[in-house]
Amino acid sequence: MSALDTFPIAQKWPATNPAVIQLYSFPTPNGVKVSIALEELGLAYEAHRVTLADADVKSPEFLSLNPNNKIPAIIDPDGPDGAPIGLFESGAILIYLAEKTGKLLGATPAEKHRIIQWLMWQMGGLGPMFGQLGFFVKFAGSEIEDPRPRDRYVNEARRLLAVVEGQLDGNDWIAGDYSIADIAIAPWLGALDFYGAKDIVGWDDLKNVPAYLDRFVARDAVQKGRVTPPRDG
């Protein structure tokens, strides 16, 4: 009997190797956080392509693992005390994987909490605000004639970028050494290119942020993780 047998999601996305971590994801800024972390940490895993279509994320099988119908989600067959565990929410998964391996979460309790504070900053601010910016610049919100919603998120994106710019002054990474905070933040910075929003948020006026994103993208694990699972099936 496999450790995955009790998880209905494994029926829709069957595992080739049920002994390794199962990743259910799509290459969005939130999705690639986990694939990048798995690559950086050297953990064996199997990636399943879960599209953003209702047929996938609102299927009974996916909802059995994540009732919030959002990617990414994982199952670790070797969870705490050797029992399998399923998790959703990218930030929670990053913390779990970092604690599981003892990597990317600082060397002291103080460092750990500084890293987590920046992870929470991304989860509560950078991701949601940039996501709304994308909606009003690239997607359906761009058809709204009233400029106020768009301007609200443009201004907030500028403010958040200024926070990152200041934090990176004299620092290569956001919270000391490279960590899960960087894995959470950098993919959302890269999303500005996908949204076609770099110009309106003043990207070219920044010095530290573009260099930071370049450093991040140059990492081998990031190169692989940002296209895992592949966008096209």
Image: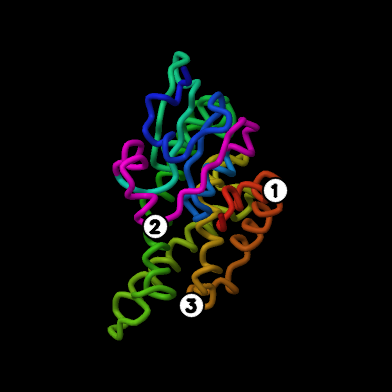
Q: Residue furthest top?
A: 81
Tell me how far mark 2 sits from mark 3, CA to CA: 30 Å
Q: Where is residue 145 shown, x and y percent of the image? A: 30, 86
Amino acid at pointer 2 = Ala
Q: Where is residue 79 shown, x and y percent of the image? A: 46, 21
- What is the quadrant of residue 91 in the picture? top left
Choose the circle earlier in sequence order: 2 or 3.
2
| Relative side of 171 to 68, left or right | right
Task: Judge the density around disc 2: few (<14), some (14-19), many (≥20) Cα neighbours within 10 Å.
Answer: few
Residue 60 belongs to the span the image colors magenta: yes
Choose the circle earlier in sequence order: 2 or 1.
2
Q: Secondary structure at mark 2?
A: loop
Task: Judge the density around disc 1: few (<14), some (14-19), many (≥20) Cα neighbours within 10 Å.
Answer: few
| Residue range of the region highlighted in magenta in the rendering | 38-67
Identify the residue position indicated by label 2 in the image: 53
Tell me how far mark 1 sits from mark 3, CA to CA: 28 Å
Identify the residue position indicated by label 1 in the image: 219
Q: Is residue 59 visible?
A: yes
Task: Judge the density around disc 3: few (<14), some (14-19), many (≥20) Cα neighbours within 10 Å.
Answer: some
Identify the residue position indicated by label 3 in the image: 200
Tell me how far mark 2 sits from mark 1, CA to CA: 30 Å
Q: Where is residue 40 shown, x and y percent of the image? A: 64, 38
Q: Is residue 111 visible?
A: no
Q: Residue at x 46, y 17 (%)?
A: 1
Labels 2 & 1 near each other (Cβ < 8 A) = no
In this picture, is 100 found above or below 58? above
Labels 2 & 3 near each other (Cβ < 8 A) = no
Q: Where is residue 149 shown, x and y percent of the image? A: 30, 75
Q: Residue at x 28, y 83 (%)?
A: 146
Single out the mark in the foreground, 2 or 3. Answer: 2
| Relative side of 6 to 111, left or right | left
| Relative side of 177 to 202, left or right | right
